[in-house]
Image (tube, rainbow, N blue to C red):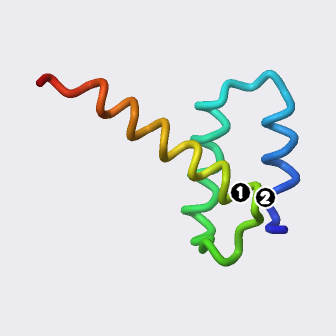
Amino acid sequence: MSKYEAELRRRLASDEDIADVGNWYLQVTIADKLEWKDCSVLEVRFMKYIHYHWKKWMKSRRLN
């Protein structure tokens, strides 16, 4: 478990917007230079979820 997992769980369980949770998580992990090997399973799954939906959103924004 990384030092951010407990806070991530708390934020996900609250009514906080998922985009805000994602922004918070990205900011703290980038600032701390957290690596994949330092993340818990929950954190890896959360990042994959965020990445998947970001790619889906980007695809929908194309002007083709």
Residue placed under numbered mark 2 in the picture? 4
Secondary element at tag 1: helix
Disc 1 crowd, CA 10 A, few/some/many (<14, 14-19, 20+): some
User: Relative to residue 44, is residue 62 depicted above or below?
Assistant: above
Residue 37: x, y in percent? 66, 78
Residue at x 81% of width, y 56% of height: 5
**Quadrant (top left/top right/bottom left/bottom right) for the C terminus:** top left
| Amino acid at dot 2 | Tyr
Nearer-the-camera pick, 58 or 30: 58
Nearer-the-camera pick, 43 or 17: 43
| Amino acid at dot 1 | Glu
Q: Does residue 21 appear to the left or right of 53 in the view shown?
A: right
Pointers 2 and 1 in contact (C-beta within 8 Å) = yes
Nearer-the-camera pick, 23 or 60: 60
Q: Please give the label number shown on residue 43.
A: 1
Disc 2 crowd, CA 10 A, few/some/many (<14, 14-19, 20+): some
Residue at x 60% of width, y 74% of height: 35
